[in-house]
Amino acid sequence: MKKVWLLIAAGIICVGTMAFAEDAKVLPARVGRLTIAPAFAFANDVYDTDGKSQSLSGSGALKAFNLGFALEYGIIDWITAAVQWAPGWNIWSDVELENPFTGKDLDATINGVYDIFLGAKLQIVGENAPVKSSMFRAAVAPGVIIPLPGVDVGEELIAGLQGKTFVAANIDRHVFGFGARGYFDYLISELFYINLYTEYIAFPIENSDTKETYGWQLTFELEPHFDINIVNGITLGAGIPVNFRMTPDTKFDGVKQDDDSYILAIKPNISCFITTLPLPLELELGYSLPLAGKNERATNSLSLLVKLYLKI
């Protein structure tokens, strides 16, 4: 049981998807985009410290429904500002845990909020960028992580042992962070391009509530992407991103913990972009399937991105 509690409480529990497109495109000047991102996730297995998959069924399995948002605005043709909260708010969740003293089921959740990313994407290379090209697109997006309040897991656990509904873990770090995202697209044809994406976020400040220091998080992604205009004003798209995310050992009260992690996942998606409506609308359905990992939950997630465009 102690091992299960550590697996539930460690790290973050990502149930959503990114509201930013992970390619080097930016919004045209004076165009705004609102993204609503509902997602359902579940994890019945966990990758242990040796990278082996261990079942959590009946003793740590979890499921959750998350609702995220993003608001973006094209300042000029090659700079887009954005506020991203996706994953955003765990509205509903359930965690299978037992009381270690009585063996009875606990009423555990992972409800709560994720932190916010605030930044801007600058397209350096592209048709409307400072460096003109119709074959390549490249962009960089510096930004900061704005922490939102978490919960006191110790107090929550006491409430749970008393038979009350409680939050078993904080779902995000809830500390300030900063870093950048990089994007590079190779446009093979009008219908097909390959995207490379990377993100580095540093967390230099200790979490004053948990005494943890998280170090950094590094992400790489490779996606072949296909778009086709089936009729005037309607474009269908599909992609198969392969995503790899890693983190170093955290420190607890200055002492290094043996909990470095990584997760490899494939995230196929299909989309439909309709420009003939009064407000252009894009719908994107995606699924995240874990392939391998270490000290990470094998979380599957199904997400829908609803994107509304407005000329301002």
Image: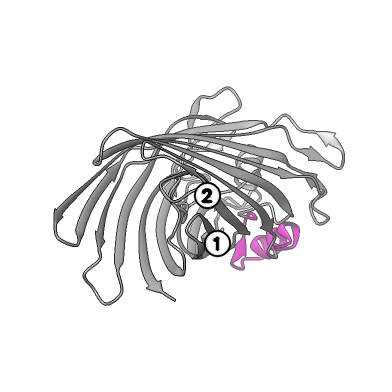
Q: Dot 2 corresponds to which residue? A: 14
For this orientation, the residue located farthest to the top is 50
> Is residue 162 shown in magenta?
yes
- Relative height, residue 81 to residue 96 (above, below): below
Q: Position of residue 37 (x, y in %)?
A: 42, 62
Q: CA distance from mark 1 to mark 2?
A: 20 Å
In the image, residue 208 sits, relative to residue 71, either above or below, namely: above
Query: Which residue corresponds to the image point at 47% horizontal and 58% vertical from the top-left?
Result: 77
Question: Residue under circle 1?
Answer: 82
Percent coordinates x, y for residue 161 in the rendering: 66, 60
Foreground pick, 247 / 27: 27
Q: In the rendered view, does 87 fall on the left or right side of 266?
A: right
Label 2 sits on a secondary structure element that is: loop
* Furthest residue in direction left, as rendered: 231
Question: Is residue 246 depicted above or below 164 in this figure?
Answer: above
Q: Residue at x 19, y 59 (%)?
A: 234
Stretch in magenta: 150-170
Q: Image check: 177 left or right of 241?
A: right
Q: Residue at x 42, y 52 (%)?
A: 41
Q: Position of residue 285 (x, y in %)?
A: 31, 53
Q: Position of residue 275 (x, y in %)?
A: 25, 66
Residue at 44% over, 51% down = 128
Front residue of this view, candidates 235 and 260: 235
In which image quadrant can residue 28 be found?
bottom left
Q: Is residue 182 magenta?
A: no
Local SS, label 1 = strand
Is 141 positioned to the left or the right of 25 in the image? right
Q: Amino acid at mark 1?
A: Ala
**Looking at the figure, which quarter contains the C terminus?**
bottom left
Up-down: is 194 above or below 81? above
Name the quarter where the N terminus is drawn. Answer: top right
